[in-house]
Image: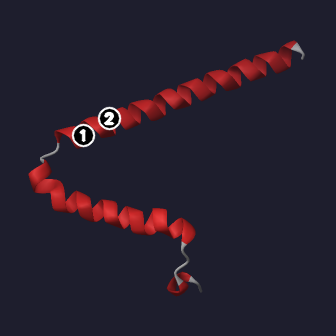
Amino acid sequence: MSEKEKKNEQDLELRKVKALEKIANSLDGLTLWFEEIDKEEWGNRIQYYLAEFHNKVVKGENDIDVSDIS
């Protein structure tokens, strides 16, 4: 491997680490937010949004809704 390829590989690895750190910080922020919310007040709302997420994203990957096909 040439010096330039080694440098490019090191730069790529550094970018990967920085990206993972940003993702981890974002997830940490979301975790703190979820821990701090008033769960009694938000309980039904969160349940609704999680159900919507599940129906559109999780189920949507495996199921095809005929009404969405143009």
Give the x, y percent position of residue 50.
Answer: 32, 60
Element assignment for label 2: helix
* On screen, residue 4 above or below 51: above
Residue at the spot 9% in from the left edge and 53% down from the top edge: 40
Q: Residue furthest top?
A: 3
Element assignment for label 1: helix
Residue identified by numbered label 1: 33
Residue at the spot 41% in from the left edge and 69% down from the top edge: 55
**Does the CB distance between marks 1 and 2 fall below 8 Å?**
yes
Give the x, y percent position of residue 48.
Answer: 26, 65
Label annotation for residue 47: none
Which of 58/38 is in front? 58
Compared across the picture, whether 62 is left or right of 25 comes to right
Give the x, y percent position of residue 47.
Answer: 25, 61
Q: Which amino acid type is marked by label 2?
A: Gly
The quarter of the picture where residue 63 lies is bottom right
Residue at the spot 40% in from the left edge and 30% down from the top edge: 25
Compared across the picture, whether 10 is left or right of 60 comes to right
Compared across the picture, whether 27 is left or right of 8 comes to left
Residue identified by numbered label 2: 29
Q: Quadrant of the C terminus?
A: bottom right
Compared across the picture, whether 49 is left or right of 41 comes to right
Which of 56/6 is in front? 56
* On screen, residue 47 above or below 22: below
Give the x, y percent position of residue 51.
Answer: 33, 65
